[in-house]
Structures are given as C-alpha cells and as structure tokens.
Image: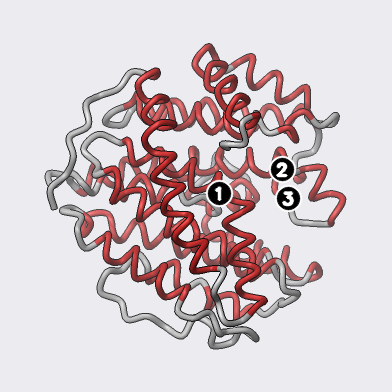
Amino acid sequence: MKTLVVLPMNRGRLIYSFVAKVFPLVKQELNRWQRMAAQLPDARLSQQATDSIHSKAFHCQGGSIFALYPGVNRAEAVRFIVAYQTMSDYLDNLVDSLEVQDELAFSQLHLAMQEALNPEADRSDYYLYYPYREDGGYLEGLVKTCQASLRKLPAYKIVQEEAVKFAQLYSYLQTYKHLALEEREGKMLNWITPYLKEYPEITTWEFAAATGSTLGIFSLYAVAFNSQLTVKQAQKISRAYFPWICGLHILLDYFIDLREDRETNQLNFVAYYEDTDMTFQRLHQFVENSLKQAARLDHPKFHRAVVQGLLAMYLSDKKGMDTDIRSITKHLLGDSGLGVKLLYWLCCQLRKKKSL
C-alpha cells in the first residue's frame, strides 16, 4: 500500500493539521456510521448505536491523532480508528445500558474487538448469548472495515500479536467490570492478580485502567505503515503505551467522572486511591513516566504531543473543575508546562464551539 509521507511537525503544525484536516475526516466517517446506526432493525440496538456515537465522538477525535503519525495514510487511518473506536463505544453501551449482566454474553460480544484485528478471521456470532441481536449487520460491518484496513498495512504481521493482546485485555475488562455489583470486583481481582508480577510499579486498579485504552492498538496500527518496522520497535512502542500512556488515558477519564460515578454507584478506578494527595501523586507519576517513555520512541515529539493532548482534552472538560478534584486539575496543569497549557486553551475553545 502506498503511504503518504508526513514530514516531522512542530506543535503548531500538528495542532493545525489535527483540527483542520483530521477532524473533518472523523466527522465524515462518524456521519456514515451514524446513518447506519439509525437504521438498525432492533430499536434498542439502534438507540445504543446512535447514542454511543453522539455522546462519545470525542473518543474518535482523540484517537485519530495517530492519523498524523509520520508515514501514515491519513484517510485510511481515520477510517480504521473511527470504525474500531465506534465498535468499542457501541459495545460499551451494550454491556452498560440495557440491564444485561451476563458474563458469557459480554465475552462473546467482545470477540468482535479481537477478530477486527485479525484480517483473516472468520466472524463469530457476536450476539449469540445476548438477548437482542437484530442489528442489520452493523457490528459485522465495523469488524470488516477494520479487517480490510489492516490488510493494506505493510508491517501489520509484526504488530498483530501485540495488538490482539491489547484487545483481549480490553475484552476481559469490559466483561468483568459490567457484572453485578456483588461479583464484579472479585472477578476482576482474580483476572488481574497474575499479571501484577510483570508490572510491579502499578496497582491492581491502575492495571485495569490501562487495559481500557485503545491507544496502544492505534499506536501499533500507525507504526505498521512502516515496511521496515522490526519486532524490537513494535515491542518498544507496546511497552511505552502499556501501562503508562494507556493508563494515564483511562485514569484521566475516570478522574473527571469521580463525582458522577459516585452518585450512580459505578466502578471507578481512581476512587480506589486513599485520598486527594495519593490521587495527585499517582496521576503525576503516570504523566512523568508517560513522557519518559515517549522520549525513548521514534518520533518522540509526536508521542509527547499524545501525552500532552490527553491532559488537555480531559482536564478541559467542565467536570475537571468539580469541587472535589479542582485542586488536582490545577496542579496537573500547572506542573505540565507551556505545551499542555496551550493545548488546554485550544481544547477549551473547541468545547465552546462544540467541536469537541
């Protein structure tokens, strides 16, 4: 597949390209899936599909930063990222919003996340154990779009194993965390504990958070445009993103949702920190380690911009100024340098215009 050559960018050029060139492509792809979602035969599935796109479009916007990774075909990358992220958000709604609490059903649904990353996989019956199933081919269409995109990548074989591993971890998380209140925590502890010896610097719930990010998959997708990619390079980017950058991503997401999740009795990984001081210390540690990992990768300025963009995007949400967490938000922004402050200002402007 012929790739587009993308020259190294300074921050200003990256921001301009992201907003002016990538956002319109994301909107175009989301509109296409939104039209399909509105036509699903089962009204309940249609509602969840349309709601997931309407309320979580910023997930696709944020993930599509990888369409600007040097050497990536921008349009093709947006097509893959939007399809994969839309699938993730749709499945999240299915396991969270329709009063279903069936481990087998959740696990079967999330086979889609794994098979979408295997270009040669036959597609399973994803709704086999789920009470609603008439989606008019919507979920299978998302999977097929991802598979078709991966077939065009010159080095996908190099990253496939790592990408599928991330998808498997994500699937376990989504299966267990949406079970009934009395069993979800025990199931998650039994699943996570064997992994902790590999990641002694993080806690059980920080590991869980890291598994909930799709950024590791998107980073591997982006580097697979490089026909000269080596296994060592793939492993290096995998270790940088998991657990640190992926963990920061989801911890920030849970951080701004603390009050909302407390009020609705939802599982929140940041709520496991003992107090405000520990919350700040651990988030700050994830920021520091993410930036250190970014500096060790090819195109370090790009990966640094990803980390800074996470801080700016999540902390610019009005929930970041909730009374209980406002001081932490201000400290994180204050400690993160001019680059984050610039991106934070831009995200605030985009939110005012409802572009984010």
For marks 1 and 2, give the CA distance: 23 Å
Say which quarter of the image contains residue 184: bottom right
Compare residues 354 and 138 and report the one nearer the observer.
354
Which is more N-terminal, label 2 or label 1? 1
The amino acid sitting under disc 3 is Asn
Q: Answer few, some or many: residues within 10 Å of disc 1's Cα (few below 14, many 20 plus, some between 14 and 19).
A: many
Q: Which residue is disc 2 drawn over?
A: 270
Residue 57: image tag: 1
The amino acid sitting under disc 1 is Ala
**Residue 288, x across and y down, in percent:** 52, 25
Say which quarter of the image contains residue 270: top right
Which is more N-terminal, label 3 or label 1? 1
**Residue 172, x across and y down, in percent:** 55, 66
Answer whether labels 1 and 2 touch (C-beta < 8 Å).
Answer: no
| As drawn, 90 above or below 15 | below
Helix or strand or loop: what does disc 1 sit on?
helix
Foreground: disc 1 or disc 3: 1
Q: Answer few, some or many: residues within 10 Å of disc 2's Cα (few below 14, many 20 plus, some between 14 and 19).
A: many
Position of residue 18 in the picture relative to residue 276 (left or right)? left
The amino acid sitting under disc 2 is Val
Residue 268: image tag: 3
| As drawn, 276 above or below 257 | above
Position of residue 275 in the picture relative to residue 9 (left or right)? right
**Residue 338, x across and y down, in percent:** 52, 11
Answer whether labels 3 and 2 touch (C-beta < 8 Å).
Answer: yes
- In percent of the image, x 43 and y 47: which residue is there? 26
